[in-house]
């Protein structure tokens, strides 16, 4: 029998795991693997730094989560409320003195534009960007209970599009949220890739008009279906690459060599999934492997942590680590809300 959010506290596990992966990967970002090992020792024993400080990945995940919670407190989650509340949270994050964790330029540029109340959010979206900032923060959409598939998908793409308008950013965010949701609901890791591929195939030409509005018109595509299909095709290609990597790559080598450095959304998804799937029953090892990588290590590790925590629940993580992660109270409060 599969597990559910209720009996394993998947939301708490995913949110804490995301932050732990982020904290492990934050100090290793921009370093190659030999340099990381020289500084922190063998990757399988990588320590959690003190204090366990996170990056903008966790901060923006909390912004998405708070915006969702506010919108859902008003009624059924819909595009108008979601756009308003998450936009407000992104603006607040951008203004915060704690926004000093090397945030991405795309998010900074978009959030500055979002401050203009007369500007439709679609005009703030950075249409050429498919950076991993789109999907590093999407896990809450996979965890909140009571949403339909349409709500999860539309909201996942909307939160991405507020900053990153490239169709691959939208599709990869949708697919990342779907992976978190499937694992939280008890999907077996061995079956996950096939489920994600089927989902991508089924949604390849589905443009979420009610959630995205006329975003697609800012591209060069002839229509909305062609616009979003470009993103899904790149995601399908990276799933193929991930499938090959699982059978041909060693878990002892830099995962970025197999599925990409993770600076872009589809590669962050694939490399985070690779680390999780290599160590589906060893969550701490999974995030250590992700953090000891040559690419965008904090984003890769935060996604690996979200997948591992959704799969194994809150008990996945050492208490001593979970108790000292930055924003622990916020993460636990949201987790408890969605696990209840």
Image (tube, grey):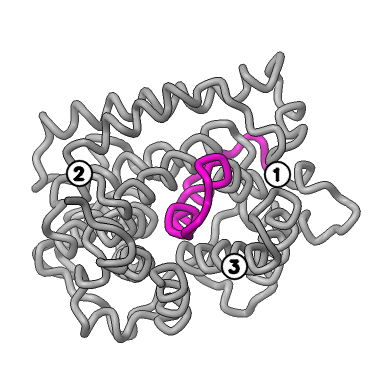
Of all residues, the one furthest to the front in this rendering is: 1
Measured as percent of width and height from the top left, residue 280 is found at 16, 51
| Observer-nearest of 187 and 277 | 187
Residue 261 position within the rendered picture, expressed as x and y whole percent measured from the top left: 34, 42
Magenta span? 126-153
> Which one is earlier in the sequence, the residue at label 2 or at label 1?
1
Circles 2 and 1: CB atoms closer than 8 Å: no
Residue 38 coordinates in the image, percent (x, y): 15, 65
Can you tell which quarter of the image residue 158 is in? top right
Percent position of residue 18, x then y: 36, 63
The quarter in which the C terminus is drawn is bottom left
Image position of 207 with respect to 306: above or below? above
Q: Residue furthest top?
A: 222
What element does badge 2 sit on?
A: helix
Instruction: Check disc 1 and report the residue beneath it.
Output: 125
Disc 2/disc 1 C-alpha distance (Å): 34 Å
- The crowding category of the residue bearing disc 2, from other C-alpha atoms within 10 Å (few below 14, some 14 to 19, many at least 20), is many
Q: Relative to the observer, which residue lies in front, 273 or 96?
A: 273
Query: Dot 3: within a 10 Å radius of its alpha carbon, few (fewer than 14), some, or many (20 or more) residues?
Result: many
Which residue bears the numbered disc 2?
Answer: 189
Q: How many marks?
A: 3
Q: Which residue is mark 3?
A: 69
98 to the left or right of 220:
left
> Residue 63 bears which disc, if any?
none
Q: Residue at the spot x=15%, y=34% of the render? A: 246
Identity of the residue drawn at 26% across and 51% down = 186
Which image quadrant for residue 72? Answer: bottom right
Per the image, label 1 sits on a secondary structure element best described as loop
Q: Secondary structure at mark 3?
A: helix
User: Which residue is pictured at 77% across the width and 48% down the height?
Assistant: 121
| 152 falls in the magenta region | yes
Task: Tell me if label 3 and label 2 are in contact, CB under 8 Å.
Answer: no
């Amino acid at each position: 029998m599969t597990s559910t959010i209720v009996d394993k506290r998947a939301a708490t596990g995913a949110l804490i795991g995301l932050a732990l992966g982020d904290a492990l990967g934050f100090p290793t970002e921009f370093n190659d693997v030999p340099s990381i090992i020289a500084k922190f020792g063998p990757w399988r024993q990588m320590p959690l730094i003190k204090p366990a400080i996170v990056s903008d990945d966790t901060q923006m995940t909390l912004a998405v989560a708070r915006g969702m919670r506010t919108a859902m407190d008003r009624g059924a989650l819909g595009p108008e409320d979601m756009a308003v509340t998450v936009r407000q949270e992104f603006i607040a994050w951008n203004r915060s003195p704690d926004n000093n964790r090397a945030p991405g330029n795309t998010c900074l540029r978009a959030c500055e534009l979002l401050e203009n109340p007369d500007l439709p959010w679609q005009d703030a979206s950075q249409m050429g960007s498919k950076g991993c900032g789109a999907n590093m923060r999407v896990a809450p959409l996979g965890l909140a209970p009571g949403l339909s598939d349409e709500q999860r998908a539309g909201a996942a793409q909307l939160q991405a599009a507020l900053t990153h308008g490239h169709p691959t950013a939208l599709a990869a965010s949708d697919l990342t949220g779907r992976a978190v949701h499937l694992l939280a609901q008890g999907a077996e890791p061995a079956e996950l890739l096939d489920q994600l591929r089927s989902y991508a195939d089924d949604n390849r030409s589905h443009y979420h008009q009610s959630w995205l509005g006329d975003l697609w018109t800012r591209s060069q595509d002839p229509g909305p279906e062609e616009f979003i299909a470009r993103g899904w095709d790149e995601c399908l290609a990276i799933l193929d690459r991930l499938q090959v990597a699982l059978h041909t790559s060693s878990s002892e080598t830099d995962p970025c060599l197999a599925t990409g450095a993770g600076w872009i959304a589809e590669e962050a998804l694939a490399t985070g999934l690779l680390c999780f799937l290599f160590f589906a029953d060893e969550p701490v090892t999974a995030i250590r492997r992700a953090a000891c990588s040559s690419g965008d290590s904090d984003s890769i590790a935060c996604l690996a942590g979200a997948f591992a925590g959704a799969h194994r629940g809150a008990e996945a993580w050492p208490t001593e680590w979970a108790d000292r992660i930055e924003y622990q109270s916020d993460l636990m409060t949201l987790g408890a809300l969605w696990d209840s």
